[in-house]
Amino acid sequence: MKKKFKLSNLYLVVIFIILYVPIFYLMFYSFNSGGKMYDFEGFTLDWYKELFQDSRLLIIVLNTIIIALLSAGISTVLGISGAIAIWYVRKVYAKNFLLSLNNVLIVSPDVIIGASFLILFTFVGIKLGFTSVLLSHIAFNVPIVVLMVLPKLQEMGASLIDAARDLGASRWDVLSKVVLPYITPGIFAGFFMALTYSLDDFAVTFFVTGNGFTTLSVEIYSLARRGISLNINALSTLLFVFTLLLVVGYYFITKRNARPIGLGARK
């Protein structure tokens, strides 16, 4: 057992090295005064200053944040409604069918989803830009929220709702005072997952974005195609730090929400 434990630790270390060394390498050279991805000459913040002086890039950052927040918020509301609707279905085959439809969008390749949305928006007559990107992000975020919320509903069980109804609670009271407070950790998990997916998405956004509107992922791709520039390193570093802050914030929020449940269980 001791040997297996050491091997598992070694495996985790190797995996984390493979995942994080390229990121830290990129972050390290964002401070290189030499302007190259090798031969570190000295520490500088010039690349970050240049980044913040680029008004076009700041607009793209704002567009990306607005799209991420709007898509995460709307998809969270739709995802909660979808999860509750699936949970209320009593027939097993019908519930499995709805779950399968929900999971198809998650396992489908992003290229297929992006191309499908491009054809749809072109056929319907929706101009490619802010609206098309927002709608596509909402579409692929809703199934993620459903998967985050549904396990909390299944964990809650029907007995809690039956008890609330026996005590005279209306449907709105059951939803607002029983169901939603119980599934709050799943709601936060779904929101933050949708937010990070929207911030990071490239493939779908690449298909549905139009002239005059773009997001950070597409802009970084276009910058990288022009050649190596440490502006990309600086921008990627800020994105990584922002995502890290989201993860830490989500951790503390879920920890705070789980604490009263634990205290109630001990009582």
Image (cartoon, grey):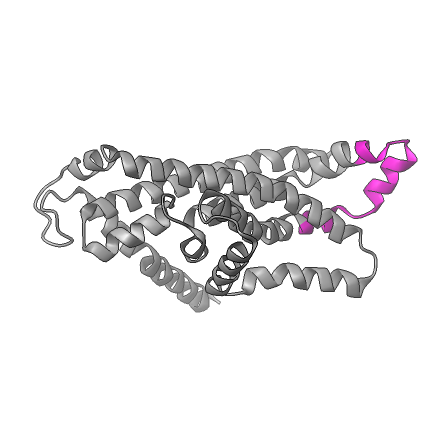
Q: What stretch is highlighted in magenta?
A: 150-174
Q: Which of 212 and 58 is in front in this view?
A: 212
State the residue at coordinates (64%, 41%): 77
**Residue 266 seen in render:** no
* Residue 148, percent from left and from top: 61, 49
**Residue 179 seen in render:** yes
Left or right: 193 as drawn, with respect to 31: right
Q: Nearer the viewer, residue 201 or 169?
A: 201
Q: Nearer the viewer, residue 218 or 45?
A: 218
**254 is within the stretch colored magenta:** no
* Residue 109, percent from left and from top: 49, 65
* Residue 43, percent from left and from top: 13, 39
Dividing the picture into quadrants, the one containing residue 231 is top left
State the residue at coordinates (37%, 61%): 15
Q: Is the magenta stretch mostly helix, strand or loop?
A: helix
Left or right: 108 as drawn, with respect to 53: right
Above or below for 252 versus 28:
above
State the residue at coordinates (38%, 44%): 213
Give the position of the C terminus as an image quadrant: top right
**154 is within the stretch colored magenta:** yes
